[in-house]
Amino acid sequence: MQWLISNDPVDYDAAMAFMEARVGAIRSGLADEAIWLLEHPALYTAGTSASPEDLLQPDRFPVHRTGRGGQYTYHGPGQRVAYVMIDLSRRGSDIRAYVRDLERWIIATLARFGVKAERREGRVGIWVDRGGGTEDKIAAIGVRVRRWVSFHGIAINVDPDLGHYGGIVPCGISGHGVTSLAALGATVPMGAVDDAMKETFEQVFGIPTGPPEEADYAVGNL
């Protein structure tokens, strides 16, 4: 497993090109599995299920069409994106289990900073109960799996400008807000988040086993 960290914002199209190449190389046995931790400049992405009416301000930021599952979401400075390029055929060949493991990974990472985050049936992503019947989304999940090698991944709101979400209906879900570690009172350096993600990833995903197979799926909302 190789961990890659980019300290400067990464162009979205360049990131997609890198992942496409790396996924092919992993499948061919020419490269190690990889987790890439990065930030993007402010932008919106549209997944395979994105509805045009959910793009409320089409001229606010660049909009990128992408092959991952889900609808519209935002990426920008202060948000830690983790692109996960691993061979799922060595981890049980189970897409649902993979998504559940991504949820567990986010929840375990946020717990390191005193945040109780939870999954919700019927709503992809990770949520925080704000009390009084209010729930805010703190992390998104959106994946694609090609011949059992995953790409795209997760995004955790560390300290982004939450006002930037106003240009979309995030993940097609109205009636709920978005939050971040900073908004919840946890002032956390990005490096500390990276360290927590590395530690909790191994706890959740363990050591891969098993032979390769083939599949191509898109799931989620990143």
Image: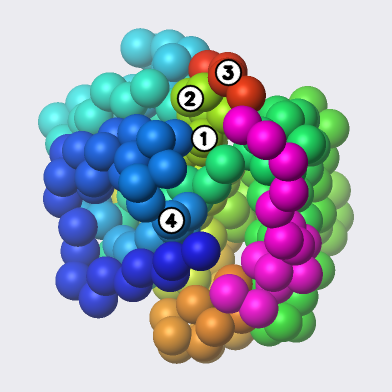
- N-terminal-most mark, 3 or 1: 1
Marks 1/2 in contact by CB < 8 Å: the verdict is yes
How crowded is the residue under tag 2: few (<14 C-alpha within 10 Å), some, or many (20+)?
some
| Residue shown at 26% from the left, 56% from the top | 40
Measure how far apart labels 3 and 2 are at the Cα level.
Answer: 6 Å
What residue is shown with label 2? 146
Marks 4/3 in contact by CB < 8 Å: the verdict is no
What residue is shown with label 1? 149
**Mark 3 secondary-structure assignment:** loop
Report the mark closest to the observer, 4 or 3: 4
Camera sees residue 1: yes
What residue is shown with label 3? 215
Q: Is residue 11 above or below residue 27?
A: below
Which stretch did the figure color magenta?
A: 198-212
39 magenta-colored: no
Q: Is residue 212 above or below residue 126?
A: above
- Residue 169 x, y percent position in the rendering: 47, 30
What residue is shown with label 4? 32
